[in-house]
């Protein structure tokens, strides 16, 4: 009986995780293609695109944090079988998407001119980086819809719809990249030549391609949510509903502050790296791109862990909560161990895909092999954070992440680069120390059991 239950748990975990993993794989593949295409234009173009990447994370993660509040609420409602409550929450998610989409459009477009300056980008690429950022954030409302509505669908157990939309967005981006980045040219084909038409817009073409792809994704995910048989907001009021918004915001606010604080840390981290020069900036951009592919198992499994934890909480099933958490942790440790080993072995090969600069490849290989060793322990932290988000425990992750980011990564990088003459290697060393601290903090908190509402409720009853 126990063996059968374990098989069922494994089947459910992978059913939820694989679409998210495939979606992230497609996103990473497109990111690889983007960086490779822009990289072919030169190191300056790569630096112009990469210089504002962490600001993109800042905006994107803050918006996504709003979705986390709805994730916990909707997953719990679905676990309890309350479809009406789940649909009302989705209607409130539509309201929040409209408000934050408009707000962030105004903020990002208004600040686009100054972002490269704040990021200490080299003066000769500041104008280009600012233009790239402006175009990228013109469809902010559609980007917000993709993030929040995708989270709502995953909370209801539908990970395949966001996956399909993500694939469409990525394919659209790739096709438009070919059309917008490069000029019209001829290529040899089967003994003859083929003319490939293009706008020759370079870096700005890459931004326009992404903006149009985000627009397509936002429209498609909205239509999918509206037609969803379980959580469609049709027929429900879009006026503020305190019974939904307050519990969602209670969960979302610490997560939003956490993501904003950590993403702001990423901005400060990248700013210090940008100050090290063009080679360091380009290496950091390329190495981050390479590394992102090897985090796919971690974040794919995190989605499954968060959804299943919320479902178990809604059903009041302690046994399912414990079994799901332990099984997901075991799977994650194995997957991230394999991922880390592959990153260590393939680092030079992967870097060659994006740059032919020997300095970038040598430096990138060194930092990637350093971080590869920490992949398994970081994977465990990712899963434990997902479980806590799924049950609405967002305060502890907020404290842990901000402590690690600002107390270890930022302070450490500042001291190493400004006072001890360290470069990119020292900065990435501080990043690894941050990941190790997260692992230790989450592990201790997990074993104490205070994160689990079902266990704490049992203690109170006893």
Image (spheres, grey):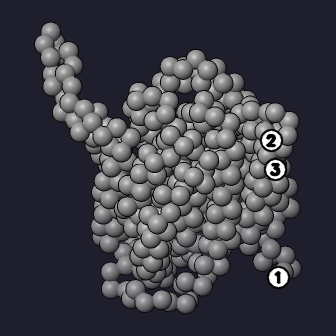
257 relative to 159 in the view: left or right: right
- Of the two numbered discs 1 and 3 on the same chain, state the one appearing first in sequence: 3
Distance from the alpha carbon under mark 2 to that under mark 1: 55 Å
Comparing 242 with 173, the one in front is 173
| Vertical comparison of 158 with 246: above or below | above
**What mark, if any, has residue 411 been given in the picture?**
3
- Of the two numbered discs 2 and 3 on the same chain, state the one appearing first in sequence: 3
Residue 338 position, x and y percent, is: 64, 30
| Vertical comparison of 267 with 450: above or below | above
Q: Give the label, 2 or 3, closer to the camera.
A: 2
Q: Residue 297's image quarter? A: top right
Q: Which residue is painted at 37% across and 78% down in the image?
A: 233
Q: Is residue 61 shown to the viewer in this render?
A: yes
| Vertical comparison of 280 with 457: above or below | above
Task: For the C terminus, give its image quadrant.
Answer: bottom right
Residue 32 position, x and y percent, is: 45, 34
Circle 1 Cα neighbour tier, 10 Å, few/some/many (<14 / 14–19 / ≥20) = few
* Residue ID for mark 2: 418
Tell me whether circle 1 and circle 3 mark residues in contact (CB < 8 Å).
Answer: no
Distance from the alpha carbon under mark 1 to that under mark 3: 44 Å
**What mark, if any, has residue 104 been given in the picture?**
none
Q: Which residue is painted at 74% across and 32% down in the image?
A: 423
Residue 386 position, x and y percent, is: 65, 58
Residue 448 position, x and y percent, is: 86, 62
* Residue ID for mark 1: 461
Q: Give the label, 2 or 1, closer to the camera.
A: 2
């Amino acid at each position: 009986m126990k063996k059968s239950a374990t098989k069922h748990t494994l089947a459910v975990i992978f059913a939820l995780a694989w679409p998210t993993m495939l979606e992230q794989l497609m996103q990473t593949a497109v990111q690889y293609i983007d960086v490779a295409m822009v990289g072919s234009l030169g190191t300056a173009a790569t630096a112009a695109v990469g210089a504002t990447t962490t600001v993109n994370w800042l905006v994107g993660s803050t918006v996504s944090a709003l979705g986390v509040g709805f994730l916990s609420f909707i997953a719990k409602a679905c676990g309890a079988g309350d479809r009406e409550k789940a649909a009302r929450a989705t209607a409130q998610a539509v309201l929040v998407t409209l408000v934050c989409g408009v707000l962030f459009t105004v903020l990002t477009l208004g600040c686009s001119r100054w972002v490269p300056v704040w990021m200490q980008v080299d003066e000769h690429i500041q104008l280009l980086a600012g233009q790239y950022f402006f175009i990228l954030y013109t469809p902010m409302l559609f980007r917000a819809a993709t993030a929040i509505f995708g989270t709502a669908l995953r909370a209801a157990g539908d990970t395949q719809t966001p996956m399909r939309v993500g694939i469409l967005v990525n394919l659209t981006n790739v096709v438009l990249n070919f059309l917008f980045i490069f000029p019209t040219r001829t290529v040899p084909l089967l003994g003859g030549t083929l003319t490939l038409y293009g706008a020759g817009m370079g870096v700005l073409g890459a931004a326009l391609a992404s903006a149009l792809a985000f627009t397509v994704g936002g429209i498609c995910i909205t239509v999918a949510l509206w037609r969803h048989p379980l959580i469609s907001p049709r027929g429900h009021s879009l006026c503020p509903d305190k019974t939904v918004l307050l519990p969602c915001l209670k969960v979302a606010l610490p997560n939003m502050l956490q993501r904003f604080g950590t993403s702001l840390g990423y901005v400060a981290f990248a700013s210090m790296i940008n100050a090290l020069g063009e080679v360091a900036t380009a290496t950091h951009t390329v190495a981050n791109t390479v590394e992102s592919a090897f985090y796919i198992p971690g974040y794919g499994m995190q989605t499954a862990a968060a959804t299943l934890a919320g479902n178990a909480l809604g059903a009041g099933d302690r046994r399912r909560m414990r079994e799901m958490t332990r099984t997901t942790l075991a799977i994650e440790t194995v997957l991230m161990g394999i991922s880390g080993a592959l990153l260590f072995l393939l680092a030079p090969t992967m870097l060659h895909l994006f740059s032919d600069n020997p300095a970038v490849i040598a430096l990138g290989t060194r930092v990637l092999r350093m971080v590869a060793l920490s992949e398994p322990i970081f994977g465990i932290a990712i899963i434990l954070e997902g479980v806590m988000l799924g049950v609405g425990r967002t305060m502890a992750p907020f404290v842990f992440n901000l402590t690690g980011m600002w107390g270890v990564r930022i302070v450490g990088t500042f001291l190493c680069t400004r006072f001890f003459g360290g470069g990119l290697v020292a900065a990435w060393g501080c990043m690894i120390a941050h990941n190790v601290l997260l692992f230790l903090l989450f592990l201790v908190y997990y074993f104490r059991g205070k994160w689990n509402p079902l266990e704490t409720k049992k203690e109170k009853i006893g």
